[in-house]
Amino acid sequence: MSDRLNINDAYSILGLKPGASPREVKLAYRKLIKIWHPDRFSHPHQKQEAEEKTKQINEAYNKLKSYLPSSAHSPSQTKQTHVYTNRSSAELFYNWGAENAKSGRYEEAIADFTHAIRLNPDYIDAYKYRGFICSLLGYEYRATSDLSKAAQMEGKLKNKQAHSASSSTQSRTSRRKSKLTSFLERFLQWIKRLAGI
């Protein structure tokens, strides 16, 4: 399909001038995909228009990637990039948040995680990651709130899965507290490894 697309049209679709660098192409692509992703639209007509626009953006990006010289330092240049429209919206925003967090764009990451949580209020991992980023930025109250919410949700999930009927109320309470403490410690270690800290 991208064979039919003229290289100048590909630049135009991405809003670039001919001769743009591979980095400029990639940044323009990411920006447009965020704007036009079909999951951002609720009206059927707008969603259909966004799907068409997303196809054009993908086609233009793939055309430019095949046209531009690939960098020896960037193996990802050889891979085809597609946005799958059947993907969960919450998962999409979570992944964008993770990518922004890894790149040090913490405020954007928080916004993406917040959007994921709005779309799926039970998204435990989004609460965890947002809590960690808030902690890094010194928003301790918000970090504590998010991490506690995630732990509480996980606790409820585990309680539904494991029906332990014979344990006393005191032992359950002490176990919950120790599990929460253990969970928070393991989670912070996992996030630090993930962020390379």
Image (spheres, helix red, strand yellow):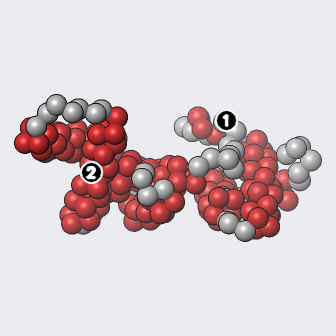
Residue 63 locus on image (x, y percent): 79, 47
For this rendering, which residue is in front, 189 or 69? 189
- The amino acid beneath tag 1 is Thr
Residue beneath the point at 85% across and 59% down: 9
For this rendering, which residue is in front, 131 or 181? 181
Residue 74 locus on image (x, y percent): 57, 39
Which label sits on residue 152? Answer: 2
Residue beneath the point at 7% across and 42% down: 170
| Disc 2 element | helix
For this rendering, which residue is in front, 187 or 193? 187
Relative horizontal placement of residue 84, taking residue 161 as reference (left or right): right
- The amino acid beneath tag 2 is Gln
Residue 92 vertical position relative to residue 185 in the rendered view, above or below: below
Relative horizontal placement of residue 151, taking residue 51 as reference (left or right): left
Which label sits on residue 187? Answer: none
Identify the residue position indicated by label 1 in the image. 78
Relative horizontal placement of residue 162, taking residue 102 as reference (left or right): left
Residue beneath the point at 21% across and 66% down: 141
Q: Residues within 10 Å of mark 1 (few under 14, many from 20)?
A: few
Residue beneath the point at 62% across and 57% down: 30
Residue 79 lies in quadrant: top right
Residue 160 vertical position relative to residue 120 in the rendered view, above or below: above
Confirm or deny contact between disc 2 and disc 1 (CB under 8 A).
no
The number of numbered badges drawn on the structure is: 2
For residue 16, say whether it is visible.
Answer: no
Residue 105 locus on image (x, y percent): 42, 60
Residue 51 lies in quadrant: bottom right
Residue 68 locus on image (x, y percent): 73, 46
Q: Earlier in the sequence, mark 2 or mark 1?
A: 1
For residue 158, say whether it is visible.
Answer: yes
